[in-house]
Image: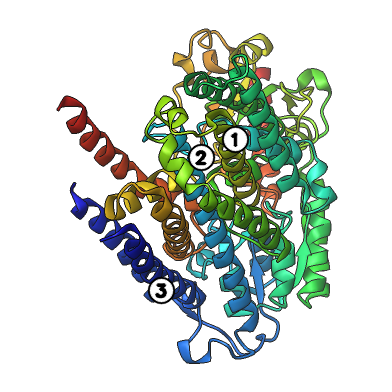
Amino acid sequence: MTPRKKLVVGLVVLSAALVLAFFWSLIAGRARVPVGEMFSAKYAPLVKLRAARALLGIIVGAGLSVAGLILQAVLRNPLADPYVLGVSSGAGLGAALAILGGVAAAGAWVIPGCAFGGAVLAITLVYVLARVGKTVPVYTLLLAGVIINSIASSLLIFLAHTAIARGQGLYSVLWWLLGSLQVFEAWPVAVAGMAIGAGIAITILFARDLNVLSIGEEPAAHLGLRVERTKKLLFLISSLVTGAAVATSGLIGFVGLIVPHAVRLVVGPDNKVLVPLSALAGGTFLIICDIIARTILSSGELPIGVITAFLGGPFFIYLLRTHRGRMSK
Amino acid sequence: MKKWVLWTAIGLLLALAVIGTVSRQVPVRESQLEGSIMSLAPSVTEILFALGVQDRLIGVSTACDYPPAAKHIRKVGDFAVPDIELLYALKPELVITTPLRDPEASKAIRFCGAKLLTVKQGDHEEVFREIEVIGEAAGVADAARRYADKLRERFARATVNVPDALRPRVYVEISPRPLRTAAKGSFLDDLIYRAGGINIAHDFSQPWTTISPEAVVARNPEIIILAYQMSRDAPYAIADRIGWSGLDAVRSGHVVTGLDRDTLTRPGPRLVEGLEALADLFARYRKGRAQ
């Protein structure tokens, strides 16, 4: 199949899956909503609430998948996920400070706002640490990411510890760290949707450059790509998309790792096809994970990160085995 | 390329989602059932049972386990965490809870059409007052006032007045790892004093606090009470802890495990029983020491 044909077929199939998953999520839940009466007034509030969740799931799933895809291509590392560059722990620290510092009560926007601020701060630090002259080498970037991640995590644990001692707020922090698509208002969905939608659109425009970059920086430069500039831009997009996703729904792991790999397994490595299809597949995947998270316990809900990690773990093993085979050849 | 791994994963995902979708769905009620109540806290559930309105209780939290009949009521969330879908389906008129773990969830409760009553239960007087508040909200104000007054009276009767010099030093362990206990500002600290003891951790700054093993050894309690909040916390062999074998409580055999932990750690009506049990324990200790 030509890439164009692959793209068209993939778009049709995955869009259909996404729409189906969306409607599925409207009737799935502890409260029974009969298919025929889905849009009657009796069920309207419930269906609206579920629709908001599903939309957030699409946005966050698509965003994390594309962010992961970008980092895997640019860092040329199959194990890169949206959180390797410190975005997650930066955002986690921001959110925890807001929750435990007591400012969260000032408004519903405070926690996502502080989380996003933390993410931006972490990326900036990683970038400054990783810079060598005018370039940002991949390895120093990864190392800086690891360093910032561990520093931010240690601060987070410090905060959590003092919170245990004072017996406050820890539940919110924990819940946030495990991730949830729970949403009670429309505006977080709208804000995250605009930010992540813009990020994905720009990435689609840069899909060709991603292809060039993934063969290596030197060959890419020989092909006429302005490597450093493109890299910085792609890092920025990936980080901001991740920051927006994390700020609205906490840390949902593994999505950015397994979805791009799964799609790549089926359609091959061409990023022009991969970027849009990963976005659609990520959205569908997260909606279905959320259906499980909401319904699998007899009361209450499971953090969605538990579901994605449960499925992501075996996938990690699979990746390890296939890559080990490739390396030994 | 082993694509079957991918298809298996997708199959598993869909299967779990289907199972979740088709199982345990609750029909959505047309309108609110008159007088129906949901409780999201064990202490609130105990109060509602004591007030005799348990028949109107259509949902409780997973932590609500007393009286035993409460275990058979439908679970509609965890301790102070409502399940919004179940709330919407069952349409209670009134939801009573201690402060919600996620304050944002109050929006969702109101969105389900329920009235939300949040009670604070810091000390015994607050518990008694909240009994009256809950009774009023549930339409049994008179019974609640009588019940609260009865508890107040029992509480006053169980309160012991002894000079500080005669009070045993008491350490109550509510969790073994990390060591946690109650301090000033908690109702348990207050119960210990009213029962005729002195809490060795009274001067700690947080009401429910961690305590180091050294601090326990340094303050040498005469009575150690194990009241673990989690029933599955194994009772550690106190005497085997390094440096603890010389404690007065260990040497004289006053490590107490038999008290009902809920009466000491749950700010509900049974705290009166907790006070009575502590007072009895300390009185026996004083008597033994006098001989």
Q: Separation of disc 1 and disc 3 at Cα?
A: 32 Å
Up/down of B34 relative to B18, above or below? below
Q: Position of residue A189 (x, y in %)?
A: 66, 61
Q: Amino acid at mark 3?
A: Ala
Q: Separation of disc 3 and disc 2 at Cα?
A: 26 Å
* Mark 2 Cα shell of 10 Å, populated few (<14), some (14-19), many (≥20): many
Q: Earlier in the sequence, mark 3 or mark 2?
A: 3
Are both tags, 3 and 2, on one chain?
yes
Q: Amino acid at mark 1?
A: Val
Are both tags, 1 and 3, on one chain?
yes
- Residue in the foreground of this view, choosing between B146 and B234: B234
Camera-side mark, 1 or 3: 3
Residue at image position (36%, 65%) is A10
For the C terminus of chain A, the quadrant is top left
- Residue in the foreground of this view, choosing between B154 and A112: A112
Is disc 2 in contact with disc 1, using a CB cutoff of under 8 Å?
yes
Mark 1 — residue?
A: A87
* Mark 1 Cα shell of 10 Å, populated few (<14), some (14-19), many (≥20): many
Residue at image position (57%, 55%) is A201
Mark 3 — residue?
A: A16
- Residue in the foreground of this view, choosing between A138 and B194: A138
- The answer to whether residue A167 of the structure is visible from this angle is no
Mark 2 — residue?
A: A82
